[in-house]
Image (cartoon, rainbow, N blue to C red):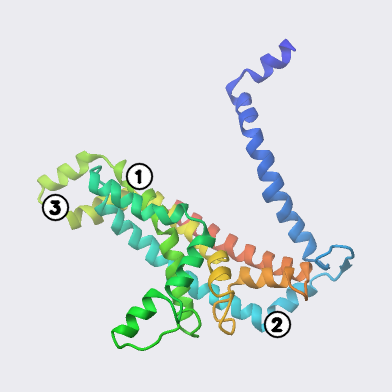
Amino acid sequence: MKGMIKYWNKPSRCAYLFLAPSIVLLMIFNVIPLAAAFGLSLFDVPMTLNSAEFVGWKNFIEAFHDDRFINSLKVTAIFTLIEVPIQVAGALVIAAFITKNNLKNKLLRAIYFLPVICSATAVGIMWRMILHSNIGFVTATLRSMGLGKINFLNTPGLTVFVVGFISLWRSFGISAIIYVTAIQQVSASLYEAAEMDGAGKVRQFFHITVPSIRPTFWYILMTRFAGALQIFDIIYITTNGGPNYTTESTVTYIYSRAFSSASSMGYASAMSVILFTVIMAVTVFMYRKMNKED
């Protein structure tokens, strides 16, 4: 017993005891399901999992010949290009204005962060009501202005941008708050020296703030990019992929193939693996570029 206590008494070993609960949860809810998805992708498996037929790479070949899957990749790419640049750059600009710890800025931070703590279900239902073609506040206001009736959630070519706005509105606050925290860590002496040299606020922002928080910038870029590629909840609640699959993301399609009447867990797992590979490749590329810049 004493020998065991002596063994774990070293900080380098004791740390593993504190990490153990997190590691166990990570294995149960992340690593094992990921390995299972890779395994299922090689089989033809129904939702009931009562039978399995080995098909090899057939599911992957079918995915790349599936027009609906290809379309979902395009929709996901469009959605990502809408949300990520606006969130990464826009949150940085907003954060620069609300960095100082005064009452007004603290209130603004709370307002920006409020949607983050709301459930996606509540946010989706709320925006469906606001943008409803018949009873929605926004559509009623536009009609009163003589702009006609606009169906924001059922118009091909428009709805994907509306869904992108809703998702951006919900997650914008977390990026802004992270930026605020990073900016507050920048030494005030740098700004004082720049001000003494005659640099204005804009030059201070681009030559002091932006370079100083570059690691935070890359962190937000990588996490938001990965999050945008996995968009599901907002789309499922607001449009469920409609109209005519113009807002059907890859994860939404994977869900429909896994749990619909024509269920195929193997095929859904194969598409999940493809999406995982895309996200991993983009993340590794960004991570290497970040390390190169550092």
Q: Are marks 2 and 1 in contact (CB under 8 Å)?
A: no
Measuring from the top left, give residue 124's x and y in whole percent.
50, 66
Residue beneath disc 1: 181
Give neighbour class at mark 2: few <14, some 14-19, many 20+ (Cα, 10 Å). Answer: few
Give neighbour class at mark 3: few <14, some 14-19, many 20+ (Cα, 10 Å). Answer: some
Q: Earlier in the sequence, mark 1 or mark 3?
A: 1
Please tell me whether mark 1 sits on a helix, a strand or a loop: helix
Which residue is found at the position 30% from the left and 43% from the top?
Answer: 184
- Nearest to viewer (mark 1 / mark 3): 1
Question: With 177 as the anchor, is 191 left or right in this view?
Answer: left
Residue that extends furthest to the top in the rendered view of this protein: 2
Residue beneath disc 2: 65
Residue beneath disc 3: 199
Q: Is residue 237 above or below residue 153?
A: above
Measuring from the top left, give residue 74's x and y in whole percent.
55, 78
Which quadrant would residue 146 be assigned to in this image? bottom left
Question: With 229 as the anchor, is 68 left or right in this view?
Answer: right
Q: Is residue 135 above or below residue 167?
A: below
Give neighbour class at mark 1: few <14, some 14-19, many 20+ (Cα, 10 Å). Answer: some
Which residue is found at the position 73% from the left and 50% from the top?
Answer: 32
